[in-house]
């Protein structure tokens, strides 16, 4: 009996020596930063929200707020990393929760793996103290940043459905995806929780810095990383515009992405508006964000909010949905090349 006890003690000691990380990992905890939701909390700890969201909820159900928000000062258990074998045993289909989409749209069912292994940085133009271009319909003043943000959220949701991981750079914790025609204006937007500067160069550099810091880590994990900047600016006041796609000078992959998106839009317009024609172009442009962002990027002008025809298209939420879907389809087309 004494020999058996010595054997059991020795076996237990060897087990602890061999697998200490498992015990520590299972108990790993941290407190959220101000403005963090579950998705960004998991991303900060190197966990894909698509894989670990449900596990996080199960481990921390009693500590979450009524709308599953994280509480400041509360310590949350971080789900242990899965082994490769465990990951393969789980179904590819799962759910992602993104509170930025709003309560009606925050649960996202992953229905495809066409963009699995891909990471996207989705950036809506302007925001915070900068409303961008301003259009008017009767008594309503319509700000570019609100419509660009709504399309950006819809695009992010489509990308998640395709199995991608998405970093939403410009954020408004209250708006969510909105189906209203006249989107209310605010200055609440942040750059991943940080106040957006009024100075234009500082404002643009801030979002470039956020993307570049994320990309430095993400490029080691993902086979395909791309950034997209979404605007509904005016090149000429009151002028109707098609959709234009810009890439940085000398970027072959940027040009390929922009071309894939233009091709997708031309095909979609041919199906849905066969008599309209499509004159959108792909070109190099020395825009600050394209010059100072490390991952391959595309800058998209989706219309002119100061033109009444374009404005009528933008205030229809089904059109904003279609634009987001076509941008997603452009990414899918590019990934296949």
Image (cartoon, grey):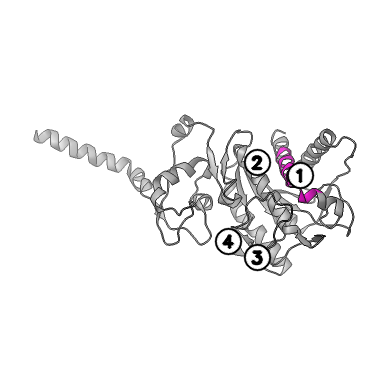
**Residue 118 locus on image (x, y percent):** 62, 41
Q: Which residue is mark 4?
A: 193
**Residue 176 locus on image (x, y percent):** 62, 52
Mark sitting earlier along the chain (2/1): 2
Are the residues tagged 4 and 3 within 8 Å (C-beta)? no
- Per the model, the C-alpha gap separating discs 3 and 2 is 26 Å
Q: Quadrant of residue 318?
A: top right
- Per the model, the C-alpha gap separating discs 4 and 3 is 9 Å
Depth check, mark 1 against mark 3: the one in front is 1
Q: Which residue is mark 1?
A: 319
Helix, strand or loop at disc 4?
loop
Q: Name the dominant secondary structure of the magenta segment.
A: helix
The correct choice, above or below, for 296 with respect to 172 in the image is above
Foreground of the two, 202 or 271: 271
Classify residue 179 as left or right of residue 52.
Answer: right
- Per the model, the C-alpha gap separating discs 4 and 2 is 23 Å
Mark sitting earlier along the chain (1/3): 3
Depth check, mark 1 against mark 4: the one in front is 1
Q: Quadrant of residue 20?
A: top left
Is residue 83 in view?
yes
- Per the model, the C-alpha gap separating discs 1 and 4 is 29 Å
Helix, strand or loop at disc 2?
helix
**Residue 274 locus on image (x, y percent):** 87, 34
Q: Which residue is mark 3?
A: 196
Q: Which residues are magenta?
A: 313-330
Mark sitting earlier along the chain (4/2): 2
């Amino acid at each position: 009996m004494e020999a058996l006890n010595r054997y059991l003690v020795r076996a237990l000691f060897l087990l602890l020596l061999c697998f200490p990380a498992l015990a520590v990992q299972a108990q790993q905890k941290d407190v959220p930063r101000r403005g963090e939701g579950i998705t960004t909390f998991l991303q900060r700890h190197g966990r894909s929200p698509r894989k670990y969201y449900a596990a996080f909820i199960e481990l921390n159900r009693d500590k979450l707020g009524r709308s599953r928000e994280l509480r400041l000062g509360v310590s949350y258990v971080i789900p242990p990393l899965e082994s490769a074998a465990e990951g393969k045993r789980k179904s590819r289909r799962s759910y992602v929760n993104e509170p930025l989409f709003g309560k009606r749209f925050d649960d996202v069912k992953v229905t495809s793996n066409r963009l699995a292994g891909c990471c996207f940085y989705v950036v809506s133009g302007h925001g915070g103290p900068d409303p961008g271009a301003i259009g008017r319909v009767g008594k309503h003043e319509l700000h570019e940043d609100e419509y660009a943000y709504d399309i950006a959220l819809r695009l992010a949701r489509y990308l998640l459905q395709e199995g991608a991981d998405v970093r939403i750079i410009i954020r408004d914790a209250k708006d969510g995806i909105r189906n209203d025609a006249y989107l209310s204006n605010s200055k609440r937007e942040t750059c991943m929780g940080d106040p957006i500067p009024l100075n234009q160069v500082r404002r643009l550099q801030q979002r470039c810095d956020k993307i570049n810091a994320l990309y430095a880590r993400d490029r080691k994990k993902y086979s395909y990383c791309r950034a997209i900047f979404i605007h509904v600016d005016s090149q000429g006041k009151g002028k109707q515009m098609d959709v234009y796609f810009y890439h940085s000078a000398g970027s072959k992959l940027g040009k390929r992405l922009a071309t894939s998106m233009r091709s997708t839009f031309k095909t979609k317009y041919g199906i849905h508006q066969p008599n309209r024609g499509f004159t959108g172009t792909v070109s190099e442009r020395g825009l600050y964000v394209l010059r100072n962002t490390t991952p391959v990027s595309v800058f998209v002008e989706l219309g002119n909010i100061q033109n009444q025809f374009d404005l009528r298209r933008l205030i229809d939420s089904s059109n904003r949905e279609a634009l987001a879907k076509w941008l997603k389809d452009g990414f899918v087309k590019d990934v296949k090349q």
